[in-house]
Amino acid sequence: MNTPGTPLSSYKDTPTRSVSVDGVDFAYRQLGPEGGVPLVLLNHLAAVLDNWDPRVVDGIAQQRRVIAFDNRGVGASGGTTPRTVEDMARDTVLFIRALGLDRVDLLGLSMGGFIAQVIAAQEPRLVRKIILAGTGPAGGQGIDKVTPLTLRATLKGALTRKDPKQYLFFTDTEGGRQAGHAFLARLKERTDNRDKAISLPAFRAQLQAIKRWGLQDPADLSNIRQPALVANGESDRMVPSQNPLDLAARLPHSELVPLYRDAGHGGIFQYHDEFVAKALEFLEAPIAVA
């Protein structure tokens, strides 16, 4: 399971592999062309490998190697889930180095964006560029309220027999509901060798980590010198849409994608074609020398 093999062009058919990190197996999938700087995907709360939109992964993988993985204690990865974003970032760095990589780009979605910020600040030689989607800085507006919001949506989902992501990731408009239905259908395209759902203890640990992040004092983002692309929907309930504006204003070398219209936390999934095109443009652009 540890030999990458021939790159594939479809995320739904990409095999799940594993790599040992300090004696713990981390599950991952990779696809796209060999060579160049790979893009490592950092996932959102409660998400496993099968929660990445295949349109986003496949679109980027047409030009770039893409690596998605389950952090410690999540999905098919072993170990116990950390209770701080900083420890999740440490595990991510260990995973990247276990793959033999010494230079990567990062795409962090929501909680994954918190992790990406920590790695970019602490490992400037490892990280070339970062994409931050549906996320915010430590101490950002409303981030400490994610737990009650998530639990209410989970209860509503159980009562209505709908996936909570319909309520958490998309607006309650005709366009938002249609986008949510289409996204959830895409997540079911992979039918074989699907990942394990997150366990309740791992989910609780992630909620604790997010709350700690939301209650922290605002971080100094001026030491994140890498180019950063920031994106979100205009009506994000989980990480309020003021946060990407704050991030873009405080990061020294940032570019803000205009907030996606009638879109929430899942804006990059709802507008996957536009996001993929912008992400590839950003990743391929030369880095200006200061």
Image: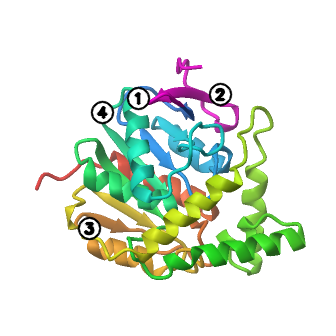
**Between tags 1 and 2, which lies in front?**
1
Q: Is residue 109 visible?
A: no
- The crowding category of the residue bearing disc 4, from other C-alpha atoms within 10 Å (few below 14, some 14 to 19, many at least 20), is few
Q: In the rendered structure, which disc, 1 or 2, sits on the residue that comes first in sequence?
A: 2
Closer to us: 258 or 89: 89
Residue plotted at (80% across, 73% down): 155
Q: Is residue 149 above or below residue 57?
A: below
Residue tagged 2: 15
As drawn, 262 above or below 7: below
Q: Which mark is residue 221?
A: 3
Q: Pointer 4: what residue? A: 102
Q: Quick check: is 12 in the magenta stretch?
A: yes
**What residue does disc 1 label?**
98
Find residue 40 and name its label. Answer: none
Amino acid of disc 1: Ala
Q: Residue at x 38, y 46 (%)?
A: 90
Foreground mark, 3 or 2, reads 3
Cβ atoms under marks 3 and 4 closer than 8 Å = no
In the image, taking residue 247 as reference, residue 153 lies left or right, namely right
Q: Are marks 1 and 4 in contact (CB under 8 Å)?
A: no
Q: Quadrant of the N terminus?
A: top right
| Local secondary structure at mark 4 | loop
Quarter of the image with the C terminus in it: bottom left
Label 4 to label 2, Cα distance in Å? 23 Å
Residue range of the region highlighted in magenta in the rendering = 1-24
Predominant secondary structure, magenta span: loop
Residue type beneath disc 4: Asp
